[in-house]
Amino acid sequence: MDDPTRRSRGVWPRDRPIRWSGVVNNLTWYVVAMAALLLQIALALPVLVLGGGVAGTVLALVWGAMTLFAAWSWITWRWRVVIAPLVTIAAILVRVAVGGL
C-alpha cells in the first residue's frame, strides 16, 4: 500500500507554476521605488543650493520629512514612495518662486 503523504518522485515541496504577473509587478515596484528614492536623495543638492533664510530652512525641513517618508514607504513596500520626490520638487519650485526670503 502506498503512503498518501509521500510525494511522487521529482516533486519538490514548493514546485508550482511561476505567476509571471507577480514577478512583473514586484520588479516594476522595485525599479520605480528605487528611482524615486534615488531622486529624493539627489534633491538634497538643490535644497542645499537654495538654502538660507526662513524659506531655506522650511525647504530643508520639508526635504528631511519627505526623505523619512520615502524611507518608511520603501521599508513597508508601498507605492506611495513616489510621493516624496514630487512633494520635494513642488517645495523647491515654491522656494524658487518666493525668491529672496
Image (tube, helix red, strand yellow):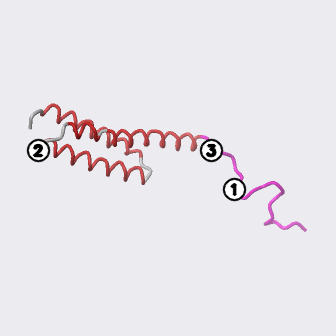
Asked where in the image residue 63 lies, by quadrant, the reply is top left
Q: Amino acid at mark 1?
A: Arg
Q: Which residue has dot 1 on it? A: 14
The residue under the point 38% across, 43% down is 37
Determine the residue located farthest toward the left in the rendered image: 101
Question: Is 31 on the left or on the right of 43, as rendered?
Answer: right
The quadrant in which the N terminus is found is bottom right
Q: What residue would you read off at disc 3? A: 19
Q: Residue at x 38, y 50 (%)?
A: 73
Query: Marks 1 and 2: in contact by CB < 8 Å?
Result: no
Residue 21 in the image: state x and y as whole percent. Answer: 58, 41
Q: Which mark is residue 54?
A: 2
> How far across and down, in percent of the image, does residue 71 sit?
37, 51
- Helix, strand or loop for the magenta stretch, by majority: loop
Decide whether residue 6 is among the magenta residues: yes
Nearest to N terminus: mark 1 or mark 3: 1
66 lies above or below 4 = above
Question: Quick one: SS at disc 2?
Answer: helix
Segment colored magenta: 1-20
Instruction: Name the residue type under label 3.
Output: Arg
Mark earlier in primary sequence (3, 2): 3
Sooner in the amino-acid sequence: mark 2 or mark 1: 1
Q: Is residue 12 above or below residue 99?
A: below
Instruction: Residue 55 in the image: state x and y as whole percent.
Output: 13, 41
Q: Does residue 47 appear to the left or right of 52 in the view shown?
A: right
- Disc 3 is placed on an element classified as loop
Residue 5 or residue 10, whichever sits in front: 10
Dot 2, how many residues are within 10 Å of its Cα: few (below 14), some (14-19), or many (20+)? Answer: few
